[in-house]
Image: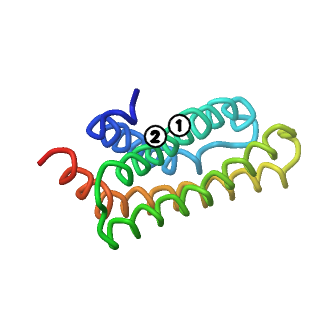
Amino acid sequence: MEQSNPGKLQDTHIVLKEKTDILQKLLPLIDEVELLHEVGSLLDYFNSGLMKHFESEESLISRLGNEFNLTAQESAVCSRITADHVKLKDDINKLNSIIVKYDHKDIEAHEKILEIVNSGIETILAHADWEDINFYPFVKTKYFK
């Protein structure tokens, strides 16, 4: 399982970050009809890929707290990640509730989906960059001395 191996978790983190970056570049090219056809893939990516990754990171954070005496700064990093995940999961849940009712003829719904996805992507990429700088380096020092 991903969370039992911090190195594999970081590899998954890198892959998801790259996929999110690609999605950000492709999104402006998707019209409302294509969005209707791609909506399942979007949901799979957010629900299966990202949500599971967040859960794995949170599991690792729990392990870190149980296995190591974390510094105040390390604890603050873990708390911020957990708080960021709450916001990101909320955004994904909002997206799910809109997509369930999505009708490609509804321009307002199309725009709302793209708005939430674009905002979510920007937040996810900023969050991933922050983790690259603040989280994964200290995880390496704990598990791979």
Counting from the top left corner in percent of width and height, residue 72 is at 34, 73
Can you identify the residue that label 1 sits on? Answer: 52
Counting from the top left corner in percent of width and height, residue 52 is at 53, 37
- Identified by mark 2, the residue type is Ser
105 relative to 112, above or below: above
Residue 88 lies in what quarter of the image?
bottom right
* Neighbours of disc 2 within 10 Å: few (<14), some (14-19), many (20+): some
Q: Residue furthest left?
A: 145
Left or right: 59 as drawn, with respect to 27: left
Q: Residue at x 46, y 40 (%)?
A: 56
The quarter of the rendered structure image containing the N terminus is top left
Q: Nearer the viewer, residue 84 or 5?
A: 5
Can you identify the residue that label 2 sits on? Answer: 56
**Local SS, label 2:** helix
Q: How many marks?
A: 2
**Local SS, label 1:** helix
Left or right: 46 as drawn, with respect to 40: left
Left or right: 117 as drawn, with respect to 4: right
Label 1 to label 2, Cα distance in Å? Answer: 6 Å
- Identified by mark 1, the residue type is Lys
* Neighbours of disc 1 within 10 Å: few (<14), some (14-19), many (20+): some
